[in-house]
Image (cartoon, helix red, strand yellow):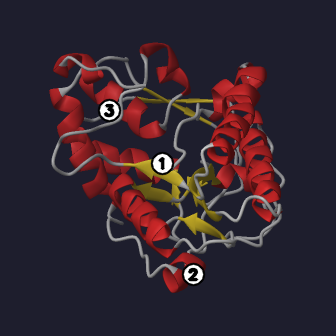
């Protein structure tokens, strides 16, 4: 299972070469190592960012891929390399490509949570920024973009709980077949706006988070949500943790106990 990659849209527009190296070039290295050591099964972590900003919603696996930022472009290149290699006579691989939508939440048992390095917090996910604001680490939440063509003017995303994402990987591994490729969207099928997300975070944390509004972030898109019908049908997978406020409550429990991330437990995970 190839999870490792830098994964911040905003940062990718500032450091595109780092993203192409870390995601695309390093995936090529992984495939070369797999070929050398005769490893035949690959579960690849991809992203809905490979679709860019489609004209039609919801997004299916057949939606054309036209990524608009270096992160999405680098992931699509990696997908193309994987698919080309899987078609070669020498590979005989089992390949599953999982295109994640927007991941939130934490391990319900409190063992793991989201803790980006401090220098990446500005580019991080909205959940991390909400929690930093609730903890007083930052003075408030910066919402970038209020003039998108959505119901309330803020971006709409499909938020998938990390626990459901883990389950999708297990089911993908169990269904992987030699010589075949499976490509799946991993999402709930429901879009939520940034304003909805912030209100849910306020309720989950019990903190009236200060919110400031700014111009759009480079490389962002207005609306993205999945059609998970294929993964529902072929892998018998359906998102179970779909209550936004509850996912944030679980994540908040971890954040309160780990204000300094994994440094509080003697470990640091990037």
Q: Position of residue 112 (x, y in %)?
A: 26, 39
Q: Quadrant of the C terminus?
A: top left
Q: Is residue 186 above or below residue 29?
A: below
For mark 2, what is the residue? Answer: 229
Frontmost of labels 2 and 1 is 2
| For residue 63, side relative to residue 119 (left or right) | right
**What label sits on residue 230 in the rendered view?**
none
| For residue 241, side relative to residue 165 (left or right) | left
For mark 3, what is the residue? Answer: 131
Q: Could you tell me which secondary element the residue under label 2 belongs to?
A: helix
Q: Position of residue 66 (x, y in %)?
A: 84, 53
Farthest bottom residue?
A: 233
Q: Earlier in the sequence, mark 2 or mark 1?
A: 1
For mark 1, what is the residue? Answer: 195
Q: Is residue 92 above or below residue 79?
A: below
| For residue 25, side relative to residue 123 (left or right) | right
Asked which quadrant contains residue 13, the reply is top right
Q: Residue at x 20, y 17 (%)?
A: 266
Q: Could you tell me which secondary element the residue under label 3 belongs to?
A: helix
Q: Earlier in the sequence, mark 1 or mark 3?
A: 3
Q: Position of residue 98 (x, y in %)?
A: 58, 60
Q: Residue at x 42, y 58 (%)?
A: 165
Q: Are marks 1 and 3 in contact (CB under 8 Å)?
A: no
Q: Could you tell me which secondary element the residue under label 1 belongs to?
A: helix
| For residue 240, side relative to residue 149 (left or right) | left
């Amino acid at each position: 299972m190839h999870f490792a990659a830098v994964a911040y849209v905003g940062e990718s527009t500032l450091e595109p070469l780092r993203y192409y190296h870390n995601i695309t070039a390093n995936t090529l290295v992984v495939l070369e190592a797999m070929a050398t050591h005769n490893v035949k099964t690959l579960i690849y972590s991809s992203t809905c960012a490979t679709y860019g900003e489609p004209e039609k919603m919801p997004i299916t696996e057949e939606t054309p891929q036209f990524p608009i930022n270096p992160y999405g472009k680098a992931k699509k290149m990696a997908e193309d390399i994987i698919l080309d290699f899987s078609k070669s006579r020498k590979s005989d691989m089992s390949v599953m490509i999982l295109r994640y939508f927007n991941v939130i939440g934490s391990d319900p048992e409190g063992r793991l949570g989201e803790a980006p390095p401090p220098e990446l917090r500005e580019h991080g996910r909205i959940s991390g920024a909400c929690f930093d604001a609730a903890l007083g680490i930052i003075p408030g939440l910066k919402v970038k973009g209020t003039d998108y063509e959505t119901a309330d003017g803020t971006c709409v995303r499909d938020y998938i709980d990390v626990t459901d994402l883990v389950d999708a990987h297990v089911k993908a591994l169990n269904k992987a077949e030699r010589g075949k490729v499976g490509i799946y969207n991993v999402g709930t099928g429901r879009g939520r706006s940034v304003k909805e997300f912030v209100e849910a975070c306020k309720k989950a944390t019990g903190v009236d988070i200060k919110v400031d509004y700014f111009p759009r972030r480079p490389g962002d898109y207005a609306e993205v949500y999945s059609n998970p019908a294929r993964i529902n049908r072929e892998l018998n997978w359906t998102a179970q943790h779909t209550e936004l406020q509850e996912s944030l409550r679980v994540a908040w429990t971890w954040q309160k106990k780990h204000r300094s991330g994994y440094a509080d437990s003697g470990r640091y995970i990037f």
